[in-house]
Image: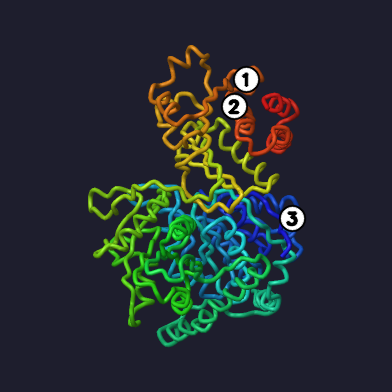
């Protein structure tokens, strides 16, 4: 197989790229964290990018999510392949239309950066509470676990919708996947065009509402026929698993990857496995690979096709040796006997011989970190004589005592040679945008794999931001915050008294501090605990007065380019000469619209 074109992007961009190929009309209304999907599609359409049908996508921004869903429904009835992008309460406002779209066999695709719902409090962060509220609508539900899958499975979502006439909800974790940047392989539009069932497209377009071929739709039905016509839809759902696997096989042929409805990873003789879906699967996979290399026999079943749930395909994927299963859900249904995926797995084994012990638990609500240590907490509990059911990981539940015992043995499952960097910034100081630029420079101009994730609270501007960057020679599958850093930079000196900046620094790592203090003032201002940790960790310590440099150059508080240049000098990820050249090219891309003076100031900063 020839080497494919690669590009560094986040999950939203990957899903948007896939959707653009198959979309005639996109009805949109922005909601965090899905907004940039629609922004990318709008930007490409304005630039004249053509879809596989040779047209620009028509983008219509409505005044609410309900309006977007209504416009989408009408567009589908008019014979246009239609798409939307949403999350959280925005998705819930579309549910009435979703029932109609599915019931009328209209091949819509919703790309959802899954997000929590407001309950005891509002949270803009990620989990599966929103998508789990749509299980009864009749939509196919397809889960992606990482940025590469957002492109690959996002394409499969459209291909399957066109072929089966059943709409698809393609979802991935909000922020954790939607905003995580990775270097991924690109599917070309001419490749995807060859996979489309054009006869199905023609039938769909010919079935549109048209005054030249009148048809009766949207009727009301009485008890004599409604039940029969509702059941008649069964024959459209039964082929879905095989159709989706067919398209997965076609994408596998193009890419060399191995997508299945249920992907099993780990030991072929595992007795204890975890079943999950979403970004947590990468954390679980990385952890079990680490422990299996050291003599363990763990496994993971990664769920992609959640609706319709294919018991046959799930059971075929699980090794016969399995005796204990922990099912992880990223949602909570108060009052239920268990969360949705857990209940589906239990039901799949009902009445089977030698049924494994099956327990369920919750993780990651509101983007709560899910770490390799949490994975081992699940396996440790699973192997106990009487494992806790209905458990939680990642929190300390001192009210109902459902949380598992912490796994406190230190280990780092990242591939050897992976470089991990953390940057502490202030919202609006340019740190996040600079690190996005840095990871794209490294990803698009070296052979290294890259990953970047940006943690900030809902205040954004003025709040603390923490950028997590990893790069290395092996594939990176670590969707959790860095806890073993080779390089840490603090862009705001006030943080030395507020946060434990060096807790995650490796022995022999490097610490870069931006501050206005001279050597004598530094001795006085730097807290003793930081001095002690620098000594204990045998760290290299660097100081830069980026504030003064920015002020002299007229950049105000925008210290980002200065700190980015310092990072490239200290990290040695590429030659200083190459990094300076690429940084200056990035300046033109980022600030070209603001005029030559701004470009010159940033170049001077570098």
* Number of residues whose C-alpha sits closer than 10 Å to that of mark 2, classed few (under 14), some (14–19) or many (20 or more): many
Tag 2 secondary structure: loop
- Depth check, front residue: 304 or 356: 356
Please identify the quadrant where the C terminus is shown: top right
Q: Are marks 2 and 1 in contact (CB under 8 Å)?
A: yes
Q: CA distance from mark 3 to mark 2?
A: 35 Å
Residue of label 2: 559
* Number of residues whose C-alpha sits closer than 10 Å to that of mark 3, classed few (under 14), some (14–19) or many (20 or more): some
Q: Is residue 154 above or below residue 250?
A: above
Q: Residue 1: x and y, percent?
A: 71, 65
Tag 3 secondary structure: loop
> Which of marks 2 and 3 precedes in the sequence?
3
Structure colour scheme: rainbow
Q: Quadrant of residue 319?
A: bottom left
Which disc is residue 410 wearing? none
Q: Are marks 1 and 3 in contact (CB under 8 Å)?
A: no
Q: Residue at x 75, y 28 (%)?
A: 596
* Number of residues whose C-alpha sits closer than 10 Å to that of mark 1, classed few (under 14), some (14–19) or many (20 or more): some
Which disc is residue 549 wearing? 1
- Depth check, front residue: 220 or 296: 296
Q: CA distance from mark 1 to mark 3?
A: 41 Å
Q: Residue at x 72, y 50 (%)?
A: 46
Q: Residue 585: x and y, percent?
A: 73, 36
Q: Residue at x 63, y 69 (%)?
A: 252
Q: In this rendering, would 316 be left or right of 437?
A: left
Q: In this rendering, would 387 be left or right of 136?
A: left
Q: In this rendering, would 111 be left or right of 444?
A: left
Identify the residue at the far top of this view.
520
Q: Residue 186: x and y, percent?
A: 68, 58
Q: How many marks?
A: 3
Query: Could one spot residue 92 in this view of the protein?
Result: no
Residue of label 3: 49
């Amino acid at each position: 197989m020839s080497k494919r074109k690669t590009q560094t992007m986040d999950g939203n961009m990957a899903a948007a790229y896939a959707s653009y190929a198959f979309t005639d009309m996109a009805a949109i209304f922005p909601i965090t964290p899905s907004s940039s999907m629609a922004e990318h599609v709008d930007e490409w359409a304005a630039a004249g990018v053509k879809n596989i049908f040779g047209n620009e996508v028509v983008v219509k921004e409505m005044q609410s999510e309900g309006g977007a869903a209504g416009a989408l429904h009408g567009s589908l009835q008019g014979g246009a392949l239609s798409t939307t992008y949403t999350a959280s309460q925005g998705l819930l406002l579309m549910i009435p239309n979703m029932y109609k779209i599915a019931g009328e066999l209209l091949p819509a695709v919703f790309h959802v950066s899954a997000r929590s719902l407001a309950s005891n409090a509002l949270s803009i962060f990620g989990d599966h509470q929103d998508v789990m509220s749509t299980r009864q609508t009749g939509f196919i539900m397809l889960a992606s676990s990482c940025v590469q899958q957002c492109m690959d499975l996002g394409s499969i979502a459209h291909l399957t919708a066109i072929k089966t006439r059943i709409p698809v909800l393609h979802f991935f974790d909000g922020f954790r996947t939607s905003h995580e940047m990775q270097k991924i392989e690109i599917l070309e539009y001419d490749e995807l065009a060859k996979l489309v069932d054009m006869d199905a497209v023609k039938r769909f377009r010919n079935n549109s509402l048209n005054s030249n071929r009148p048809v009766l739709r949207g009727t009301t039905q009485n008890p004599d026929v409604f039940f029969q016509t509702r059941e008649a839809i069964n024959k459209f759902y039964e082929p879905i698993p095989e159709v989706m696997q067919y398209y997965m096989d076609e994408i596998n042929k193009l890419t060399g990857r191995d997508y299945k409805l249920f992907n099993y990873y780990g030991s072929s003789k595992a007795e204890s496995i975890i079943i999950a879906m979403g970004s947590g699967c990468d954390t679980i996979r990385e952890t079990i690979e680490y422990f299996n290399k050291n003599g363990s026999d763990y496994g993971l079943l990664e769920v992609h096709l959640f609706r319709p749930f294919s018991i046959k395909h799930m059971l075929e994927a699980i090794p016969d040796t399995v005796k204990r299963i922990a099912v992880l859900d990223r949602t909570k249904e108060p009052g239920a006997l268990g969360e949705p995926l857990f209940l589906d797995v239990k039901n799949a084994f009902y009445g089977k011989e030698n049924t494994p012990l099956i327990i369920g638990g919750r993780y990651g609500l509101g983007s709560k970190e899910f770490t390799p240590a949490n994975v081992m907490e699940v396996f440790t509990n699973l192997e106990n004589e009487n494992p806790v059911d209905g458990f939680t990981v990642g929190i300390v539940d001192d009210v109902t005592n459902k949380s598992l015992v912490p796994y406190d043995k230190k280990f780092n499952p990242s591939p050897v040679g992976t470089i991990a960097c953390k940057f502490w910034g202030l919202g609006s100081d340019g740190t996040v945008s600079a690190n996005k630029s840095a990871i794209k420079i490294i990803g698009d101009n070296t052979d290294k794999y890259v990953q970047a994730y940006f943690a900030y609270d809902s205040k954004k501007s003025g709040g603390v931001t923490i950028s997590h960057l990893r790069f290395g020679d092996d594939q990176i599958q670590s969707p959790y915050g860095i806890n073993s850093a080779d390089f840490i930079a603090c862009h705001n000196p006030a943080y030395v008294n507020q946060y434990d900046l060096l807790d995650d620094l490796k022995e022999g790592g490097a610490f870069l501090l931006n501050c206005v203090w001279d050597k004598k003032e530094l001795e006085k201002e730097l807290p003793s605990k930081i001095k002690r940790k620098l000594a204990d960790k045998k760290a290299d310590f660097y100081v830069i007065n980026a504030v003064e440099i920015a002020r002299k150059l007229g950049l105000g508080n925008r210290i980002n380019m200065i700190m980015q240049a310092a990072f490239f000098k200290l990290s040695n990820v590429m030659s200083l000469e190459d990094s300076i050249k690429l940084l200056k090219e990035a300046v033109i891309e980022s600030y070209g619209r603001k005029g030559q003076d701004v470009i010159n100031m940033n170049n001077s900063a570098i």
